[in-house]
Image (tube, rainbow, N blue to C red):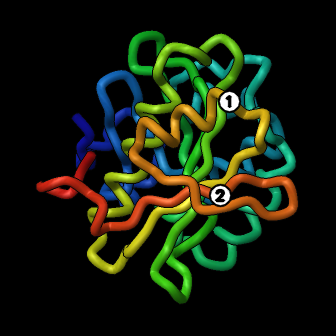
Amino acid sequence: MTRVATNTAGIGYDARQGENMIETENLKLIPCGPSHLATALEDKKGLEPLLGVSVPDGWPVFPGAIPHIYEKLRSDPSAAGWWSYLLVHNGDRVLAGDGGFKGRPDGFNEVEIGYALVPGYRGCGLATEAAKGLVRWAFSHPKVAAVKAETLPHGHASIRVLEKLGMRFAGATDGVLRWRLDRQDLGEGGSR
């Protein structure tokens, strides 16, 4: 089950973004605002008191993405739901990874998802759970026609996640495999 949360109390986060928080069975996907990213850039452990979570040594998996997303959100804070999410494991309140979108829907009304988990949280279905939550959130917006993803050919675990989402292989370019799920491919009720 995936739902959009409206109660943001106690998670150290801008309540105006509450409609963008995604909850799954084991994860809370908290949209990053500029303040989260500024804190992560200064000292990632600063997120611990801000969010009430533990930040493991392996987070972020892709630290180079943080400055880029920070600049995007500084120029348009209202786009927070269309960028990065912090993946908080409900059971132990650990920042298990991050994921999200590469911006608002494009000119074709398509969005691209990405996700990454720290090593201790891989291989137990959390990537699929997070990606499924992101896909459902995206398709809860009537404008979104398709959700896309990219992975490397050797990313077997990531390929399996995309297959579980019902995405279909859409080709390869420059050594990158492209996948997509079109709205019309969704089952009844808008989910797979």
Residue at the outermost bottom position: 107
Q: Earlier in the sequence, mark 2 or mark 1?
A: 1
Q: Position of residue 53 (x, y in %)?
A: 54, 22
Residue 129, placed above or below residue 102: above
Residue 11: tell me if it is visible.
no
For the residue pair 36 and 175, the one nearer the viewer reads as: 175
Residue 104, placed above or below residue 53: below
Q: Where is residue 16 in the image (x, y as percent from the top left)?
A: 37, 62
Q: How crowded is mark 1: few (under 14 residues within 10 Å), some or many (20 or more)?
A: few
Quadrant position of residue 123: top right
Q: How crowded is mark 2: few (under 14 residues within 10 Å), some or many (20 or more)?
A: some
- Hey, what amino acid is under mark 1? His
Q: Residue at x 78, y 22 (%)?
A: 58
In this rendering, position of residue 50 left or right of residue 119: left
Q: Where is residue 75 in the image (x, y as percent from the top left)?
A: 68, 78
- Hey, what amino acid is under mark 2? Arg
Q: Which residue is drawn at 32% across and 33% down?
A: 24
Q: Name the residue under label 1.
A: 156
Residue 38, placed above or below residue 1: below
Q: Name the residue under label 2.
A: 178
Name the quarter where the N terminus is drawn: top left
Residue 111: tell me if it is visible.
yes
